Image (cartoon, rainbow, N blue to C red):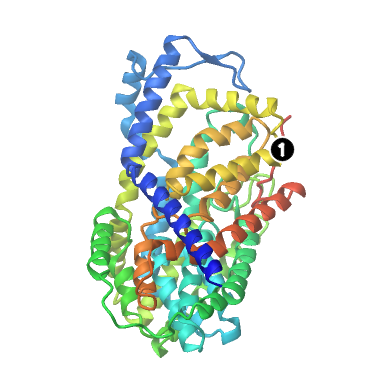
């Protein structure tokens, strides 16, 4: 017996050493703005050297070889000084993400999103509670990063109220929100952000631009819907059959242990830093709200607010459906349909904006969170404060991608990479799996999904596009690798917030404790999500409305 305990102890120490090494390595990475500034300079130097050596690239779809253009040349410097503002303002994610985040700010600050979550969690019977947490956690990306600090404590409270172990709910809420972050049952600002980045790199190869299906916020919707449903059920199963039995076996207290943990000042520092850097959208909807949650049940006025909001949204849905179904609808394309491109699909941002803005306003008006229409700009202003870090990062991101495209170095990497994959006979799904593995590994060090996709898309969308893959399919593959591992990386800034809640029941818990609690989710999520992608690939299922797996190249 003691021998097995010694072996287990050695294994834990070995894992802790590994995790400490990952943390030290990850901490050496610069913050995103510095990282992309460095990538911009590296690209600028590389393309200049290639231009000096007269490097050219045979881009499919062009009649003549395309020369690489150098940044540190007269032409390059003139291009940059003339277009620095356009590179920023023309960054595609800005025109899609900003409107949606403005609407979400209304829905979030009025309490509309939180009320919907508590409605689902609070109405679930005890046996169904793990699966309700799974569904809410996976759908939590609607709230952006606030999901990490709102959903876990709500799940903890719901589990305790139902007579189940609160720590199991806490763990399940954080795991589902993090490991399933890149998917959802409805389009979110993340879909708009990914679509904007994808569109910004498609133009590097004319053949792809001419033959690829249009990319919009619902280009991965069918894949997202299937993934969200499966991952939500899987999360519930793991919570119910693996996590809760484990915490019971470990004898973790079901009641909060009232002893100092030394975390309060550290947690406050994280919150303050989050306010400065934009990590938390709003202080009132982040950690403080989570601290103040005492009951997951809705008040009578909140229930009335939800009923009123859903009624109005239902009426709007009927109006929209009626408007697009009439034969002469202006939202149809020239052929009278909606696919692969139509004004309806171009209106996705407007539709998502309407759902959150109208739902949030009606709910807030009924509950008293909004006294009149004059409160709307104040709420939207709060959303602008929350997206400050994104607006700043978009400046360097937009110019980095613009340089990547203008210089031709992105096309060169894509063509050379595609030829390498063909020589290695890795043009099938095996190459996609390797891409997912790479994304999962990088996700341990680069937590920002938009930041990592900006890097990956610039290279891999054109590369796989030259092999015939639709950009929407590669974007879907990225989602798999982008989410599963972010709940086990010390680089996740919300780890310390989660640790604060966990230490209420396990005062001696540390980062290694979190990793060990999260590992049961990582591998099953990764495998299940990859299998779903393989099914879409194998049976040539559409990733979204009008978006397939392979391009129809004449």
| Image-quadrant location for residue 212 | top right
Which of the two residues, 230 or 373, is positioned nearer the viewer here? 230
Q: Residue at x 50, y 89 (%)?
A: 163
Give coordinates of residue 50: x percent, y percent: 45, 15
Q: Is residue 542 left or right of residue 452?
A: right
**Helix, strand or loop status at disc 1:** loop
**As drawn, 520 above or below 214:** below
The residue where tag 1 is placed is: 428
Q: Residue furthest top?
A: 53
Which of the two residues, 490 or 483, is positioned nearer the viewer here? 490
Q: Residue at x 53, y 28 (%)?
A: 204
Give coordinates of residue 405: x percent, y percent: 47, 28
Which of the two residues, 238 or 393, is positioned nearer the viewer here? 238
Marker count (numbered): 1
Q: Residue at x 44, y 86 (%)?
A: 297
Q: Residue at x 32, y 74 (%)?
A: 289
Disc 1 packing (10 Å; few <14; some 14–19; many ≥20): few
**As drawn, 476 above or below 120:** above
Quarter in which the N terminus is drawn: bottom right
Whether residue 503 is visible = yes
Q: Is residue 175 left or right of residue 257?
A: right
Whether residue 315 is visible = no
């Amino acid at each position: 017996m003691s021998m097995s305990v010694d072996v287990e102890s050695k294994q834990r120490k070995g894992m802790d050493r590994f995790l400490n090494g990952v943390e030290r390595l990850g901490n050496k990475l610069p913050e995103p703005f510095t990282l992309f500034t460095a990538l911009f300079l590296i690209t600028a130097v590389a393309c200049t050297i290639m231009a000096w050596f007269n490097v050219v690239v045979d881009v499919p779809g062009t009649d003549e070889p395309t020369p690489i253009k150098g940044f540190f040349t007269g032409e390059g410097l003139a291009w940059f000084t003339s277009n620095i503002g356009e590179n920023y303002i023309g960054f595609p994610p800005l025109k899609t993400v900003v409107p949606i985040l403005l609407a979400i700010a209304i829905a979030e600050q009025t309490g509309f999103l939180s009320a919907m979550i508590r409605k689902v969690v609070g109405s679930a019977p005890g046996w169904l509670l793990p699966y309700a947490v799974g569904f809410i956690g996976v759908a939590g990306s609607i709230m952006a990063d606030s999901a990490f600090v709102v959903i876990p404590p709500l799940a903890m409270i719901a589990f305790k109220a139902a007579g189940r172990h609160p720590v199991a709910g806490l763990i399940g809420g954080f795991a589902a929100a993090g490991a399933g972050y890149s998917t959802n049952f409805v389009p979110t600002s993340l879909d708009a952000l990914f679509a904007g980045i994808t569109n910004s790199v498609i133009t590097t190869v004319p053949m792809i631009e001419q033959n690829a299906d249009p990319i919009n916020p619902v280009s991965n919707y069918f894949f997202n819907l299937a993934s969200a449903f499966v991952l939500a059920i899987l999360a519930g199963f793991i919570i119910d059959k693996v996590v809760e039995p484990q915490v019971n076996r470990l004898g973790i207290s079901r009641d909060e242990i009232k002893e100092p943990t030394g975390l309060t000042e550290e947690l406050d520092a994280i919150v303050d830093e989050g306010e400065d850097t934009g990590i938390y959208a709003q202080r009132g909807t982040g950690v403080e709200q989570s601290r103040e949650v005492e009951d997951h049940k809705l008040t009578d006025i909140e229930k009335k607010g939800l009923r009123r909001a859903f009624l109005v949204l239902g009426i709007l849905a009927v109006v929209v459906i009626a408007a697009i179904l009439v034969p002469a609808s202006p939202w149809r394309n020239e052929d009278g349909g909606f696919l692969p491109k139509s004004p309806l699909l171009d209106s996705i941002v407007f539709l998502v904006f309407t759902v959150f803005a109208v739902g949030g306003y009606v709910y807030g008006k009924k509950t008293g969170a909004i006294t009149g229409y004059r409160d709307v700009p104040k709420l939207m202003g709060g959303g602008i404060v929350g997206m400050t870090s994104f607006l700043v990062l978009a400046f360097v991101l937009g110019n980095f991608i613009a340089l990547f495209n203008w210089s031709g170095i992105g096309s060169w990497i894509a063509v050379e990479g595609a030829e390498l994959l063909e020589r290695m006979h890795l043009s099938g799904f095996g190459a996609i799996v390797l891409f997912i593995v790479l994304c999962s590994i990088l996700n341990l060090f680069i937590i920002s999904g938009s930041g990592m996709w900006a890097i990956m898309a610039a290279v891999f969308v054109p590369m796989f596009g030259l092999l015939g893959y639709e950009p929407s399919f590669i974007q879907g593959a990225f989602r798999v690798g982008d989410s599963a591992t972010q709940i086990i990386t010390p680089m996740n800034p919300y780890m310390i917030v989660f640790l604060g809640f966990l230490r209420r029941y396990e005062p001696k818990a540390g980062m290694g404790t979190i990793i060990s609690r999260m590992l049961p989710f990582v591998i099953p999520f990764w495998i299940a999500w990859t299998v779903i992608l393989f099914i879409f690939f194998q049976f040539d299922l559409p990733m979204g409305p009008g978006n397939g797996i392979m391009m129809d190249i004449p």
